[in-house]
Amino acid sequence: MSDFNATDFPNPSTFILLGIPGLETVHIWISIPFCTMYAIAILGNFTILFIVKMEPSLHEPMYYFLCMLAITDLVMSTSILPKMLSIFWFNSREIEFNACLIQLYFIHCFSVMESGIFVAMAFDRYVAICDPLRHSTILTNPVVAMIGLAVVLHGCIIVLPTPFLARRWPYCRTNIIPHTYCDGMAVVKLACADIRINSYYSLSVTILVSCLDVFFITLSYTQILRAIFSLPTKDARLKTFRTCGSHLCVFLAFQIPALFSIFMHRFGQNVPLHFHVLMANMYLLVPPMLNPIIYGVGTRRIRDRLLQLFTCKGT
């Protein structure tokens, strides 16, 4: 293996991913829960896609958004897990420079998309609960397709400058990344140049996207809660509140670790590096695992269809 601490490689051909610094001796043990979460995410999200595709009664806006979320989760978790496991299991730490930038782009792009899909799902629930008679006329298939396209373009365009900015810097200190994947700030911190433009842009995007998404979701659920408490029966209130509560918990499970990870890059110099890396992995692995469980098992129509499939196979 070449000397990774060479002092002059302004355009490195490869980066070296360390994995979880300080926990190298337990990489194999850490891989077990990570691999389990990935397996659950793959199985759960593909199951949701299959059930929604095969069941015509589920061809509705809520389930279309759920399919978008499942696809986003599959791409986001697959962007990091295969390479991470190759580090843990085979000590395969090298990643090509361009592949690193592509991974960086996919991770951040689909993270923004996921947050946008949560906003779309909150809007769908708002219309369904607060204006149920007009739900089918407001959220028609063309409108759902336009919302999905807007979410995709929003994620693709807003993150696009990040890999291009990272590519233009000279890297003359080291090509070792103390991380399990090519995180944006972890990469540009290796550059021997003034990277404030990267830092400011990344922080601005984070604050803008997170604040706007949190604002729209809060606005939607505030109106939803008002509608819930005006329902005539206690059972109806509990059922609606339980459904919306699960949606809100999934969003917070994604958003809180993501914000923690991003802000630790800038203000968490005293936070242990291994803790920071673990948290950065959690927000990319836990939501893809939880989403199909909460939205699949927790949604009666999907649960009933799944039980029906198993019952048919058993008879």
Image: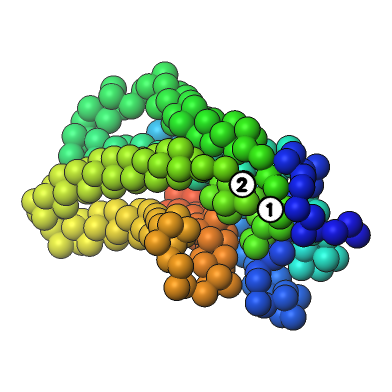
Nearest to N terminus: mark 2 or mark 1: 1
Q: Nearer the viewer, residue 272 or 151?
A: 272
Q: Quadrant of residue 27?
A: bottom right
- Where does residue 145 sit, x and y in percent of width and height? 45, 23
Q: Left or right: where does residue 64 sit relative to residue 133?
A: right
- Residue closest to the eye, 303 or 138: 138
Screen quadrant of the C terminus:
bottom right
* Residue 165 on image: x %, y %: 56, 34
Secondary structure at badge 2 equals loop
Evaluate if marks 2 and 1 touch, with contact meaning CB atoms under 8 Å apart: yes
SS at circle 1: loop
**Residue 76 drawn above or below residue 169:** below
Query: How many angstroms separate mark 2 from mark 1 (CA)?
Result: 6 Å
Work out which quarter of the rendered image holds the N terminus and state it.
Answer: bottom right
Task: Name which residue lies at 25% across and 41% down.
Answer: 216
Q: Residue at x 16, y 49 (%)?
A: 222
Residue 284 locus on image (x, y percent): 55, 56
What's under tag 1, amino acid-wise?
A: Arg
Residue on which the image places disc 1? 173
The residue labelled by disc 2 is: 192
Q: Residue 87: x, y in percent? A: 77, 63
